[in-house]
Image (spheres, rainbow, N blue to C red):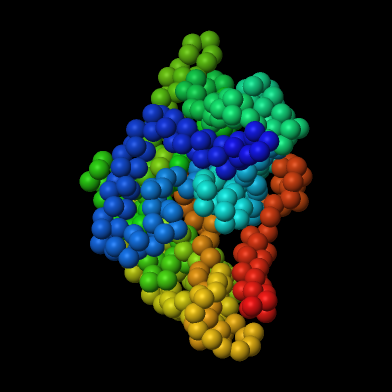
Amino acid sequence: MTRTGKVSSDSIRARFSAAMSAMYREEVPAYGTLMALVAQVNAEVLERDPQFAADLAETDQLDRISEERHGAIRVGTAQELATIRRLFAVMGMYPVGYYDLSEAGVPVHSTAIRPVGEAALRANPFRVFTSLLRLDLIADAGLRARAEQILTRREIFTPGCLELIGKAEAEGGLDEANAARFVAEALETFRWHSDALVSADLYKRLHDAHRLIADVVSFRGPHINHLTPRTLDIDAVQDRMPAHGIKPKAVIEGPPPRRCPILLRQTSFKALQESVSFPGETAVAGSHTARFGEIEARGIALTPKGRALYDRLLAEVRTRIVPAAEGSNAGEYMQVLAEVFAAFPDDWTEIRRQGLGYFEWAATGRGEVAGDDPEALLAAGVLRCDPIIYEDFLPVSAAGIFQSNLGDGAVQEFRASPNQRKFEADLGAQVLDEFAHYAAIQQASLDACLKARRAA
Ligand code: OOG
Ligand code: NI
């Protein structure tokens, strides 16, 4: 609580994330199983590596290690997107980055709405990968008009939620009672509704246009479609999922396992068949697959140069082997991935010297040497330099996660181009440039070290 009697946005985010986790475990029991497996594997890793456990304890992250890092939703209109942005702003979350998934056969474009800055991320890292359906990619004009009509008529926010968003904006936050109300009201937007808005027939037409269109248009709201805790050993969790009765996607997305982890590795269990009732003259029972569970492991944020190398290597892998959805070539894929990524330096000093990754500088309080040259200060042990963790997403990986959970049948193709301007106009705000953001953190940390030296 601040002096003004307002609850901090970090605290609202932490409460919201906990409430969402509890709701999702109720809704998708397999997610609870995954959470338990993740907690078990994390505990094993920490037992094997007491130094790592001590480091985590020191930075205060140990007891929250298995908590959710992210979730994802898909909204249907500009109006919904803009209000979602305002809703998350109450929790101290802001749009970072633009992702065009149409390139990968998914008719959405997206942003990560997330806490920005070390203190906020540490207080609670929860973020939401937020996608807007691109109705312009529905070829059939009649169907597009129907979808638009349904989406403009639905109201995905409760009146109480809208009122509290307005209040938080007007008064610069919420007091205790209103923060508690806000968390409960906001949660309603993300709840699963098994009673569809559309008839079975229309659902089928939307589904045939693209499965994702059916998922966004057919329901009362943008149900949370997955939550994602952090794992300390993603390969182990992937291997053990089947023994716990959950079916993992074929391969882990992202880079191979490395000594110096880069970017983001993620995998999920396949979306469940859930029963749905369709209204109509005679209600019809059907099913829908949308909701799953995911795990992630993060490494260093890469510079544009590092990212270009990553993208080039990944593209090279994909020219040699495309992972089959049913997993038949998973072993071979992982082997090719490891082989090709041997070209990416796996040593922090090399990664820094070649300007491939972002680092945070800090004074050690030890050593003595004159001058302002960071490399010399580092060599003398006066400064230290730690990787900055990547807090964003990867479009190719995201597309893999989407595809795996829409059902792995045919990949549905269409033509489209990225349209960040339009996305930002719909969002009602510009997205933060992720590279500029990491570069600024690196620069600020170095500037602060050098300034403190000059003052000393
Ligand atoms: C979002 C998929 C993207 C990730 O972790 O890359 C994502 C979705 O399926 O809506 O969450
Ligand atoms: Ni995800």
Q: Quadrant of the N terminus?
A: top right
403 left or right of 45 in image: right
Closer-to-camera residue (152/241): 241
433 left or right of 391 in image: right
Q: Residue at x 51, y 36 (%)?
A: 15
**Residue 271 location (% of width, % of height):** 40, 39
Q: Quadrant of the C terminus?
A: bottom right
278 left or right of 6 in image: left
Q: Can residue 450 be seen by looking at this rendering?
A: no
Q: Residue at x 35, y 42 (%)?
A: 35
**Residue 139 location (% of width, % of height):** 66, 40
Q: Can residue 242 be seen by looking at this rendering?
A: yes
Closer-to-camera residue (129/150): 129
**Residue 330 location (% of width, % of height):** 33, 60
Q: Is residue 313 above or below residue 74?
A: below
Q: Is residue 178 above or below residue 455?
A: above
